[in-house]
Every structure is written in C-alpha cells, then in structure tokens.
Amino acid sequence: MAALAELEATLDSEFLRALAEPVRVRILKILLLQGPQDVGAIAAQLPQERSVISRHLKTMKDAGLVDVRPDGRNRLYALTPGGFLGRLEDILDTTRRCVAVCCPNNQSR
C-alpha cells in the first residue's frame, strides 16, 4: 500500500531522527523562544561543549529544521521558516491518509 510506504518513509525521515535527540529538542526550544543565535550563545545555555552543539546544529540544518546565515564573524542559526511546522503538518497528513486506508473504522476525526 502506497500510503503505508509513505508513512514508513516519513517515520524514518531525517526530520524525525533529528528530533529524537533531547539536546536537539532543547536547541529547538531555545531558537523558538529566543530567536536566531550563534553557536556560542546556544552552547552557553546547555551543558554540552560548543563543538557538540555545532554538530547537533549541522544535523538540524541537514534535516531542514534550521537555517544558517552569516552575521559578521558569526553564523546565526534560526528555525527554518515554515520548516518545522510544515514538516509536522506533512507527517499528520500522511498519517491521516494511512489511517483512512488501513483502519477506516478507527479514525478519531
């Protein structure tokens, strides 16, 4: 079934793997609540070393969660406009399509 294959691919996506790490969720919260920041400002709020935070930010960038832009000597990280919410909406839409195909009597909406 195409819907199930699509759901499986969505659940195995780089986006969800990026969110599976608690530190990345904390970074996401920082950027959501405080806006764009450089790696030093983010790392100052977390117990991990700056290099570890930098690797997490790269993973988040590769997953489409954050954008990076130069700011003088620094690089500012910000949530990708529409990226986070858009991806969650895609996952929800895919899940709804799958449920409609595989379990039509169990739909809650």
Image: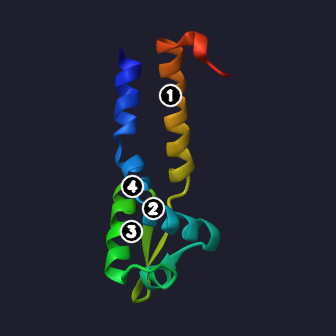
Question: From mark 2 to mark 3, how far is it between C-alphas?
Answer: 13 Å
Query: Which element is circle 1 on?
Result: helix
| Residue underneath mark 4 | 18
Query: Which element is circle 2 on?
Result: helix
| Residue underneath mark 2 | 22
Name which residue type carries label 2.
Pro
Badge 2 crowding class, 10 Å Cα cut-off, few under 14, some 14 to 19, many 20 or more, is: few
Tell which tag, 1 or 2, sits nearer the viewer: 2
Name which residue type carries label 3.
Leu
Q: Position of residue 16 (x, y in %)?
A: 41, 47
Q: Position of residue 82 (x, y in %)?
A: 55, 51
Tell which tag, 2 or 3, sits nearer the viewer: 2
- Verify CB contact (< 8 Å) between mark 4 and mark 1: no
Numbered label attached to residue 95: 1
Is 49 above or below relative to 81? below
Question: From mark 1 to mark 3, how far is it between C-alphas?
Answer: 28 Å
Query: Which element is circle 3 on?
Result: helix
Q: Residue at x 54, y 34 (%)?
A: 92
Residue furthest bottom as drawn: 73
Looking at the image, residue 25 sits to the left or right of residue 48; the answer is right
Q: Earlier in the sequence, mark 1 or mark 2?
A: 2
Instruction: Give residue 2's quadrant in the image.
Output: top left
Question: From mark 1 to mark 2, how far is it between C-alphas?
Answer: 24 Å
| Residue underneath mark 3 | 57
Q: Earlier in the sequence, mark 1 or mark 3?
A: 3
Q: Residue at x 45, y 62 (%)?
A: 22
